[in-house]
Amino acid sequence: MTRKRATSTIWRRRVGGQLLRWREPVMSAADAAKAMEWDQTHLSRVQRGQYRISSENVRKLCDLIGVDDQAAVDEVARVAEKPLGGGWWAPYAGRLSDAYLDFIELEAEAESIRIYHPVVIPAPLQSAGYVRELLTRAASNLTAERGEMLNSVRMARQEILTRDERPAKLHALVPEPALHARFDSGPAVMRDQIRKLIDATEMPNVTVQIVPLTAHPAFVTKGPLTLLSFRHPWVPVVSVDNPMGGTHTEEPEKVSALEEEFGLISSIALPVDESRERLEKYLEGLYE
């Protein structure tokens, strides 16, 4: 039996937050609740993502507060109907942190993803063998069963790049030091990983840039970050990686600051063609 999440999902909270952004400048909470035949507590909980709102009520509330962007209303109404904790990740509720589940749900809806990690290959482009090496060395108490589960989750997430409908666009900044990794299980792990990176460069929705060993430390000492952009009207989200699944924010100032950071790192990374050439040289063993 699938275990339900104890908290509302990130998208239920985002629906409520978008409705709040539309309502607040034009109508008081008291007036909006009265017009919807709710009490203010109910409206407040909808806006915080604690209560589900139907697509019908999304449209009714938007009509009351005068939202005239029909495409935006349709999108919010669509997401409002998403089942709580639905998706391929539903069976993992209770086995993964809520923060990680939130990130998976955000990633699954993203139109574009920009990602940089200063030490390892970005997750959307990791091979199964590479992930297995990272997981088994990251925690001494990780059981083989849990390690394989986490590996399966990582691989399942990569479906966003190859799905038939609206595959996500990915811009990945790959740190060149990560290509020098050595594993006890042998060099085949990195050969497979580099092949996967080269294959990714041929995908029309993927941009891969190598951040070279010669990059100034001021650029490469930044922490890992992921920038997610979505269909209108959803605001972008930035996620900063950590062992508990990351922290996510849509605060405009923080998103803007980290977008600038990504742009700066991208500006000193190798161009796309040179990045592919360097990957091919690594595969040929020309760099050690």
Image (cartoon, rainbow, N blue to C red):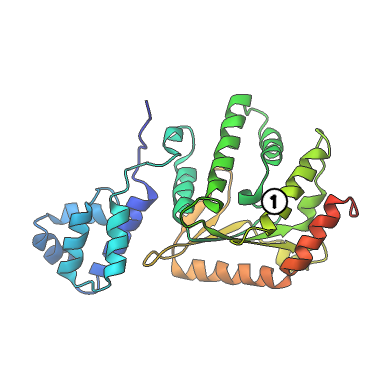
Q: What residue is shown at x 57% (from left), y 47% (from top)?
A: 158
Label 1: which residue?
121
Q: Is residue 283 visible?
A: yes
Answer with the quarter of the image where residue 200 lies: bottom right
Position above or below: 218 against 15:
below
Residue 146, quarter of picture: top right
Residue 109 falls left or right of residue 190: left
Q: How many marks?
A: 1
Q: Residue at x 27, y 63 (%)?
A: 19
Q: Can you give x and y, in whole percent of width and height, for residue 48 in the image?
A: 29, 54
Q: Amino acid at mark 1?
A: Ile
- The x, y position of residue 205, in whole percent, is 58, 61
Question: Up-down: is 229 above or below 135?
Answer: below
Judge by depth and name the residue closer to the eye, 249 or 79: 79
Can residue 120 be seen at all in this image of the molecule? Answer: no
Specify the quadrant that holds the N terminus. top left
Q: Nearer the viewer, residue 208 or 64?
A: 208
Q: Nearer the viewer, residue 139 or 190?
A: 190
- Residue 60 lies, with reference to residue 283, above or below; the image says below
The percent coordinates of residue 63 (x first, y second) are 17, 68
- Residue found 77% across the figure and 40% down from its top: 189
Q: Within 10 angstroms of label 1, few (less than 14), some, or many (20 or more) residues?
A: many
At numbered mark 1, what does the secondary structure look like: helix, strand or loop?
Answer: loop
